[in-house]
Image (cartoon, rainbow, N blue to C red):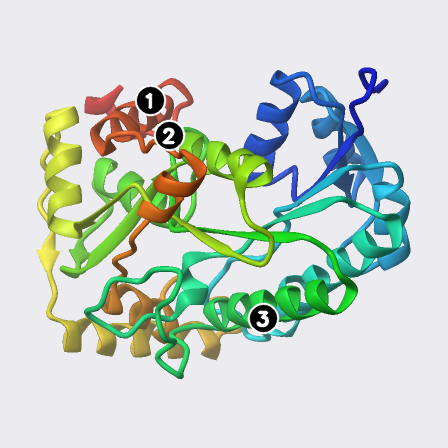
């Protein structure tokens, strides 16, 4: 890929993922010369199809990162692991913590002008019942291994960036949703629509449209202050409100049982123990239920004021997402086709 006069390439890590892929698409659409880190031929082929130049490498291989960043003006680091119920969380810690530190160290070696780091609002660790923002005090303990690794990763990124004098802007999205998302809260939506969701707990969740997440990253490159964190969050609502919104958009009203917190926690213990007994990854576990019951409320207004982010109304995101599910065959009940 040949850069336009005066325009240096951009490297994206995690370009095969939901958030990273959307960043790649937006950069390519904007005419930017884009390189994207690829760990496999399949990933490389997919990235090439998106209009990016695949670069073989891994966030755990600093030298491959330096080669990929050669001549780049900006790096978007969106690679990472986000999963629950792992028997061994060490690989996730290596990718999220060590891999992120490697990206910043490689940027220093390659002379990159700016790194936009995809952190997570989960790294804030706000006290239960409070609104998380850029200056919230951490509660002092972690709901999950994912939250722990993202918290440690952001700390490492900020420390290494200061030590090596690399301008890094941290972007902290809440739960990112939209067409193409099939995990996390998206699984809840699909299970509800397909009639397989039997139980729910009443909690609060924060929500971000993938388009707003992408725009927020690009605006962070343009207007973000190095060393600062910007929370991205479009809306916060309860699970009851989410189900009502989905029902209003689709006309589908499935019956679910609302479990009290103690019963839900007990169910998670039983399911986790049963799965471990037969050597399988549990579909539900204690850390997942802790996170769900804790809930999250985030304030994304700083990104509006300082970056110029404008958030999409939730009903528009839900409508687009449900349409995508239908068009791509993810609604399996005959009465929803």
Q: Which of marks 3 and 1 is nearer the N terminus?
A: 3
Measure the C-alpha gap from mark 2 to mark 3: 38 Å
* Coordinates of residue 283 in the picture (x, y in percent): 40, 62
Q: Mark 1 points at which residue?
A: 326
User: Mark 2 and mark 1 in contact (Cβ < 8 Å)?
Assistant: yes
Instruction: Assess disc 2: are there few (<14), some (14-19) or many (≥20) residues with their C-alpha within 10 Å of its C-alpha.
Output: some
Instruction: Assess disc 3: are there few (<14), some (14-19) or many (≥20) residues with their C-alpha within 10 Å of its C-alpha.
Output: some
Q: How many badges with numbers are in the image?
A: 3
Q: Name the residue under label 3.
A: 155
Snapshot quadrant of residue 297: bottom left
* Residue 122 visible within the image: yes
Residue 330 numbered mark, or none: 2
Q: Earlier in the sequence, mark 2 or mark 3?
A: 3
Regarding mark 2 in the picture, which secondary structure is present there? loop
Residue 73 as seen in the image, left or right of residue 269: right
Q: Which residue is drawn at 33% across and 48% down?
A: 300
* Coordinates of residue 264 in the picture (x, y in percent): 20, 71
* Residue 91 visible within the image: no
Regarding mark 1 in the picture, which secondary structure is present there? helix
The N terminus sits in image quarter: top right
Instruction: Assess disc 1: are there few (<14), some (14-19) or many (≥20) residues with their C-alpha within 10 Å of its C-alpha.
Output: few
Regarding mark 3 in the picture, which secondary structure is present there? helix
Q: Residue at x 78, y 23 (%)?
A: 7
């Amino acid at each position: 890929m040949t850069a336009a006069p005066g325009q240096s390439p951009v490297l994206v890590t995690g370009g095969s993922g939901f958030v990273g892929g959307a960043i790649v698409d937006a950069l390519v659409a904007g005419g930017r010369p884009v390189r994207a880190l690829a760990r496999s031929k399949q990933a490389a082929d997919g990235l090439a199809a998106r209009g990016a130049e695949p670069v073989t490498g891994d966030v755990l291989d600093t030298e491959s990162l330096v080669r990929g960043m050669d001549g780049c003006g900006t790096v978007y680091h969106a690679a990472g692991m986000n999963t629950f119920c792992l028997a061994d969380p060490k690989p996730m810690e290596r990718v999220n913590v060590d891999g992120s530190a490697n990206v910043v160290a490689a940027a220093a070696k390659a002379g990159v002008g700016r790194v936009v780091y995809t952190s997570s609002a989960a790294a804030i660790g706000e006290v239960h019942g409070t609104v998380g923002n850029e200056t919230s005090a951490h509660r002092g303990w972690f709901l999950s291994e994912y939250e722990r690794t993202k918290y440690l990763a952001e700390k490492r990124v900020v420390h290494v960036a200061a030590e090596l004098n690399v301008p890094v802007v941290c972007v902290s999205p809440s739960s990112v949703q939209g067409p193409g998302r099939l995990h996390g809260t998206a699984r809840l939506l699909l299970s509800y629509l397909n009639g397989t969701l039997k139980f729910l707990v009443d909690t609060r969740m924060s929500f971000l449209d993938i388009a707003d997440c992408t725009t927020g990253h690009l605006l962070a490159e343009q207007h973000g202050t190095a060393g600062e964190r910007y929370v991205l969050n479009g809306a916060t609502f309860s699970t009851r409100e989410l189900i009502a919104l989905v029902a209003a958009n689709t006309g589908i009203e499935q019956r679910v049982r609302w479990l009290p917190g103690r019963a839900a926690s007990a169910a998670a213990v039983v399911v986790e123990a049963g799965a471990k007994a037969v050597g399988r990854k549990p579909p539900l576990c204690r850390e997942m239920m802790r996170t769900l019951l804790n809930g999250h409320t985030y304030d994304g207004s700083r990104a509006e004021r300082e970056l110029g982010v404008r958030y999409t109304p939730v009903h528009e995101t839900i409508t687009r997402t449900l349409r995508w599910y239908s068009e791509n065959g993810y609604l399996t009940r005959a009465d929803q086709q």
